[in-house]
Amino acid sequence: KKRGPGKVGIIVAVVTLAAVLALIIGLLVWHFHCKSDLKSQKIYTGSLRITNQVFVDAYENSDSAEFKELANQVMAQVRTKFKLICFGSVIAYYESEFAVPAGQEAAVDQAVNTSMRFTQHAKSSAEKIITSPGFPDKPYAPDSFVQWQLRGDPGHVLKLSFDTFNLEENCSNDFVRVYDSLVAVDKHLMEEECGFYSPSNPLTFISSRNVMLVTLVTNKEENFPGFRAQLACGGKLSGTSGSFKSPNFPSYYPPNKTCQWDIEVPDGKYIKLRFPKFMVSTGSLNHCSEDYVQIVGKSTLCGQQPANTMVTVNSNKMTVVFKSDSSQVDRGFNATYEVFEPTDPCPDKFQCDNKRCVNPSLRCDGWNDCGDSTDERNCKCDASMIQCRNGFCKPMFWRCDGVNDCGDDTDELNCGCKSGEFQCKNNQCVSEKLKCDGNRDCKDGSDEDGCSRDMCKDSTFMCSNGKCITKPNPMCDGQDDCGDGSDESNCNCGKKAYTKSRIVGGQDADVSEFPWQVSLHVKNTPHVCGASIISEQWLVTAAHCVQDDAKIKYSQPGTWEAYLGLHTQKEKPKSTKRLIKQIIPHKNYNSYTYDNDIALMELDSPVTFSETIRPICLPAATDVYPAGETVTISGWGATREGGGGATVLQKANVRIINSTVCDELMSGQITSRMTCAGVLSGGVDACQGDSGGPMSIFSNERMYLAGVVSWGDGCARRNKPGIYTNVPKFRAWIKEKTGV
Ligand code: 4AZ
C-alpha cells in the first residue's frame, strides 16, 4: 500500500520551492538590474565658459583659494540657471570620472600608473620645449598615455611646432593628438598624427585660444624615438642683464614667426642690447620689410649685422620684436642685454668714437673691433705686431705678403724675397720664372729690365714655332705673322665688351662685362653653380659642383642646363640655354680636401660667340700669380655667408694671397693645386653659389681664367681668404680632354 506525503513533507516541499523561486528571482533581478549597473569606467571631459570673469594665474591651481571661490560661484550658478553676459570670460575645463567595473581594477591601476600629465605655461622668455618621455636618449615607453596641457598668457594664441616627429607608422598603435582645448574633447581635436615628419617640414599647430592639449598614446608593439616640439617665442625679461634668441638659433628660424620680448630693468638704468650674431634674411627686396628685428622706437635691423652690433636705449624699458615672413629664412640672432648707468656708458671698457664699448684687450690687436678703427689708433705695438708708421699695429704674418695692410705701405717695405722669387725694384716679389718672359709682372716692369735674351730680343711676340715678330702688336691683327697662326689664335678670348674697365662685398657687374660667365641650373630650379666658357662647346667648372648627393645626380649631364650670356637671373628665359652632353670631373678630385676641384662640361651643341657670349682666355701652364696681384671674381652666389643668391651678376676685386701665409691661415689645407685670394680684413669674397665660376686676371689687355671658385671657411671672414682651383696647373689636362 502506497503512503501519501505527510504534512511535514508538504511543508518542506513548499519551502524548498519558495527558496528556489526566490533564488531564481534574485538571480534574474541581479542579472537584469544590478549587473547591468556595473558599467565600465568612463571619463567625460568638457568645458564651459564662465562669463564676466577675468582669468588670473591662480585659476591654474585647483587648490588655490581663488579657484575654490570661483568653483563655488560656478556651482551656485549651475544650480540656478546660466547667466549669459558676454564680456570677459574664463573657460573651465572639467573631467567627470565614473565607477570602475568590478574585477577590472588592476587594469585601471595599470592605465593610471602609466599615464603622466604635464602642464606648461608659455609665459617666460625661454622657448618651451616638450618631448616624449625619454627623448632623445631612448624610445618612448610601451602602453603609455601622456598628456601635456599648454597654456599661454590671456589674449595670446599658442603655436606648437614639432621639429622632430618619429612615431610608429600605424596610428592605431601609437599616436599623438593635438587638441584646441585643455581637455581631450573630440570636438576640439585638431589632428591625430603618427609616422615620421621631416624637420624641414615640421608639423605646426596654432590654437584658437591660449590653451592646447597634446596627448601621446602608445601600445605594446614597437617603440619609436618620439617627438620634440617647441612653443612660441618671446616674453618678459627683467633684472640687470639677460639674453634671448630667435627660435631654433643657431639653426634656421621658422617662417611666419613673430616674437616679442619686453625688457624692463630697474628704474634709473638704461639698456644696452648686443647681438653677438645677427643673420636675418633680407629676402629678395634687400630691405627690412620681410624678416626683421625691431627695437621699438629706436631702429629696425635685418640682413647680416657685424658681430656684437649694439643698440642702446635711454630708458629702463625696451621692446624687441622679431618677425619672419613666409619666404627665405636665415639663422637668426642671439642677443644679450645689460644695464648701464646714464653717466658711464662703457664701464671697464674702451669706448669707441662711434659709442661702441669694446674689451680693452682688443685695443691695438690689429683688428678693427670698433668698426670705426678707433681701437687701433695711436698704438704702441708689441713684438708680434708690425708698427705701422700711421700708428696702427698689424699681425706680423701680414708683413711682405704683397698687400698694403697698414695703409701706408710700412708692412711691405724692405721685404727680402724667398728663394725662387725675384725682387722687383719696388720691393715686390715675383716668381723667378716671370723674369724676362716679355710680360711686366712687377708693377714697375723691373722684371723685364736688362733682359738680354738672344731669342726674340727687341721683338714684340714669340710664336709657338719659335719665330720672333718685331712688328708692333702682331697679335690678333688679322695677319698670320708667325706662319703657324699662333699670333692669330684664340683672338676671341678674354675681351670684355666694355673697354672701361653674389659675391660678398661686390657690386653689380656691367652687362656683358663677363661674357664667359655661365649660370648652371639643375633643370627647372634656380642657379646652383657658376662656370666659364673656354670654347664654343666647352665650359670649365668645379668638380664639387658635379658630385652626386642623396637627392640629386649632379654628376649626370641630363641633370643640368647652362645659361650663357645671362646678366640677371630674371632674364633666364631670354638667354642662350644649352643642355650638357658630357661632364668630365678631374679624376683626382678629393671631396674631403677639395684638391683638384675642377671639371669640364661639354655643351650639347656649340654656341655662336657674340657681344654677350665669349670665351675667357686660358692661362699658360707656367703662369704664376704673385701675391698682391688683383683678380676679379664674379657670380650669382650668396651676397653674405648663409644668405641668398644674387639676382644680378656680382663682381668684386680681391688679391692673390701668398700661399704660405694662406696655408697657415687655413690650417694647412692648401695644396699647390689651389690659389688663395681675398681681402684679409674680411668683407669681400666668393660665397656659396659662386663655386665653379671664374677668378679672372687681367693681362695683355685680356682676361685669363686664373682660378675656379672652389671653397673657403665661410664667406668674407677676416683672415679667411677664398680658395680657388689653380687653373695653370690644369692647362695640359684641359688640352688633353677638350683640345682647347
Ligand atoms: C661654396 O659653398 C663656397 N668664401 C664657395 C666659396 C667660398 C665659400 C663657400 C669662399 O660654394
Image (tube, helix red, strand yellow):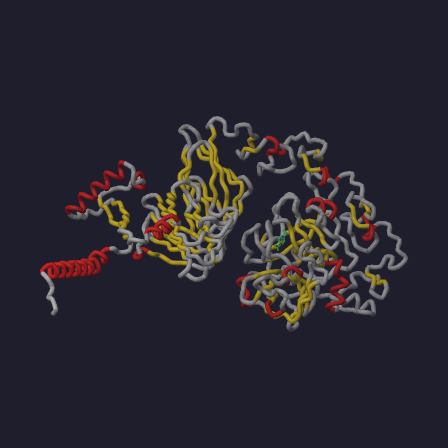
Which residue, as the protein is rendered here, is positioned at the far front?
1
- Tell whether 279 sits left or right of 453: left
Instruction: Return the x and y of residue 737 as percentages of the image width and height.
Output: 73, 67
- Judge whether residue 295 can be spotted in this image: yes
Quadrant position of residue 694: bottom right
86 versus 699 height, above or below: above
Of residues 37 and 184, which is closer to you in this image?
Answer: 37
Task: Give the farthest residue toward the top.
Answer: 343
Quadrant in which the C terminus is drawn: bottom right
Residue 611 visible? The answer is no
Q: Residue furthest bottom?
A: 605
Above or below: residue 703 compared with residue 228:
below
Q: Position of residue 277 (x, y in %)?
A: 53, 43
Quadrant hosting residue 465: bottom right
Along the line of sight, the residue nearer the viewer: 528 or 509: 528
Comparing 545 with 408, the one in front is 545
What is the x, y in percent for residue 408? 69, 38
